[in-house]
Amino acid sequence: MLDGDQLAVKLETAVVNKSSLVALSLDDRRRIVAVLAADAPWGLTELQSVLVKQLKQHEELAARKRRALDQEHFRSQRVG
């Protein structure tokens, strides 16, 4: 175990408890993807793929929200 590493502790606890779900922050997901990007073991390629997909979906949603806010700001500038 990596002492003091909260993500490592969280993942180790999930394995020990045979958890099927683990809550991961965006930073946790990015970190796991970065570690697995170099050479993901066969058993973790699906996890890497799922996390990459989730991160991409999050980025697309954030971009849509930014565009909507920009459009709203533009409209309020025209009216005002």
Image (cartoon, helix red, strand yellow):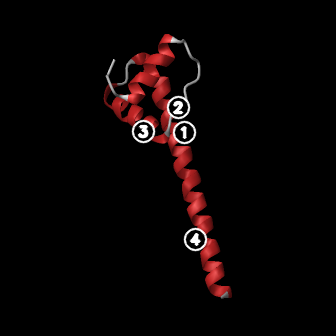
First along the sequence among labels 1 and 4: 1
Q: Which mark is residue 70?
A: 4
Query: What's under tag 4, amino acid-wise?
Result: Asp
Viewer-side label of 1, 3: 3
Residue identifier under label 1: 54
At horizontal 59% and vertical 59% (from top left) the residue drawn is 64
Image coords of residue 7 (percent x, y): 41, 29
What amino acid type should be assigned to the residue bearing mark 1?
Gln
Residue 32: image quadrant is top left
**Pointers 2 and 3 in contact (C-beta within 8 Å):** no
Q: Which residue is mark 3?
A: 30
**Which of label 4 and label 2 is nearer to you?**
4
In-front residue for pair 13/61: 13
Graded by Cα atoms within 10 Å as few (under 14), some (14 to 19) or many (20 or more), the crowding at tag 4 reads few
Earlier in the chain: of badge 1 and badge 3, it is 3
Q: Residues within 10 Å of mark 3 (few under 14, many from 20)?
A: some
The residue beneath circle 2 is 50
> Which secondary structure lies at badge 2?
helix
Mark 1 to mark 3: distance in Å? 10 Å
Given the image, on which type of amino acid does mark 3 rest? Arg
Pinpoint residue 17: horizontal percent, then vertical percent: 53, 12
Q: Amino acid at mark 2?
A: Val
Quarter occupied by the N terminus: top left
Instruction: Report the residue at 37% width, 19% height from top.
Output: 41
Give left or right: position of 10 versus 1.
right
Would you say 42 lies left or right of 74 here?
Answer: left
Quick check: marks 1 and 2 in contact, CB under 8 Å?
yes
